[in-house]
Amino acid sequence: MLKIDATDRICVAGLPRSGKTVLMRYLATLPRRVYIIDPLNQYGEFGEVGDVLSGKTRCVLRLDEFDMFEDVCKKLHHVSNVTLVVEEAEHFIAQGRKMGTYSASLIQMGRNWGIGIWCTTRRIQGISKTFFDLAQHVMFFRCGLKSRDYIADMIGQDYVRPVIKSRYNSTGYTITTLPEHAFLHFNLETEDAQISKLELGARSHIETEGKVKKGKVNTATEDAEVENAQAR
């Protein structure tokens, strides 16, 4: 089961049309409160576009509206128990670009306030390393070849390039050879991994094909589960 917390830091990465936004749109239905940075206007079913303090659920920003993103983060300092979803996050939580005071503190301290940050990206190497230092989960769909070295440094060569008699990766896949709509879920805290596949149909669910822990592989079909932690 993909057991995650509404206050976690999560990244879903993959090539265009790999399934990352489909997965995030499903996950975003699970927390009690969610606010979505939706630059490509893909989350219309989540409600009206508006200000986070007005109770609206979405904000459609251009990819270069960094000041507007900082303004959203500032307003979230006055809100608790909400999950912030950031699409195209490499434009807003970017490596090599100095973040604003409020976005930086939200990434570093938001979990203590009951605020989760879930993001999607086409180029995982473009996301702030500070974010990954504090993240709990990464979901990799098929990623571009230029992402290989970065991902290998993050979770190990075994999940990036085929390794004979791998000690860790018993799934039979790497992040460049995943089947269509399949993804690798890596828990950055426990270093457990599993391969799952989106089953697209009337009932949204995620099929878990293989769970890897200490070289063992199990098979199951499970729905994702989100624990909605309350701010303390």
Image: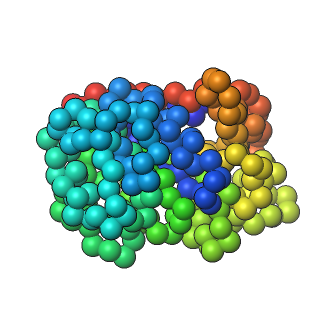
163 relative to 149, above or below: above
Instruction: Farthest residue to the top: give it.
Output: 203
Point 52% across, 34% down: residue: 26
**Residue 132 visible (yes or no):** no
> Is 152 positioned to the left or the right of 229 in the image?
right
Indicate the position of residue 58 as horizontal and vertical percent values.
32, 42
Instruction: Farthest residue to the left: give it.
Output: 78
Indicate the position of residue 186 as horizontal and vertical percent values.
59, 48
Query: In this view of the protein, which residue sits in the foreground, 193 or 33?
Result: 33
Indicate the position of residue 208 as horizontal and vertical percent values.
70, 34
Point 70% across, 45% down: residue: 181
Find residue 102 and report its image quarter: bottom left
* Rendered-image quadrant of the N terminus: top right
Point 65% across, 67% down: residue: 144
Query: In this view of the protein, which residue sits in the foreground, 197 or 8?
Result: 197
Query: In this view of the protein, which residue sits in the foreground, 1 or 143?
Result: 143
112 relative to 204, above or below: below
Point 63% across, 28% down: residue: 205
Find residue 88 and report its image quarter: bottom left
The coloring applied to the image is rainbow
